[in-house]
Amino acid sequence: MCEATAYLMRKNGDEELLLADVDLIEPQEGGQMRLVSIYGEQKVLKAKIKSMSLVNHRVVLAEQ
């Protein structure tokens, strides 16, 4: 499977699981990101991409 796991890096440097099995990440207006899992679960938050490792199926978003 090629889905990724998304993590949110807080402003204080703490990292937490945001959403597993992410299929889609798309930018929204106002600096927000929309994440959708293969199960249809969605999260929208104000963040930017900090790093992506496609080999490790890992995306880290930085809180804004």
Image (spheres, rainbow, N blue to C red):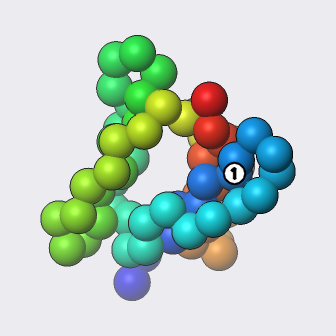
> Residue 28's quadrant in the figure?
top left
Give the labeled residue for mark 1: 9
Q: Nearer the viewer, residue 20 or 16?
A: 16
Query: Quick one: quadrant of the N terminus?
Result: bottom left
Q: What residue lies at 81% left-to-right and 45% top-to-bottom?
A: 12
Residue 14 location in percent, x, y?
Answer: 77, 58
Q: Residue furthest top?
A: 30
Examine the rendered structure and indicate whether residue 39 appears above or below residue 33: below
Question: Is any part of residue 54 visible from this angle?
Answer: no
Tell me if mark 1 has few (under 14), some (14-19) or many (20+) residues whose alpha carbon lies within 10 angstroms of its own: many
Q: What residue lies at 34% left-to-right and 17% top-to-bottom?
A: 29
> Residue 42's quadrant in the figure?
bottom left
14 vs 60, left or right, is right
Q: What residue lies at 34% left-to-right and 42% top-to-bottom?
A: 44
Examine the rendered structure and indicate whether residue 38 appears above or below residue 63: below
Residue 20 location in percent, x, y?
Answer: 43, 73
Q: Residue furthest bottom?
A: 1
48 vs 11, left or right, is left
Question: Is any part of residue 26 visible from this angle?
Answer: yes
Q: What residue lies at 38% left-to-right and 74% top-to-bottom?
A: 21
> Residue 8's quadrant in the figure?
bottom right
Kind of residue sitting beneath label 1: Met
8 vs 13, left or right, is left
Q: Nearer the viewer, residue 55 or 37?
A: 37
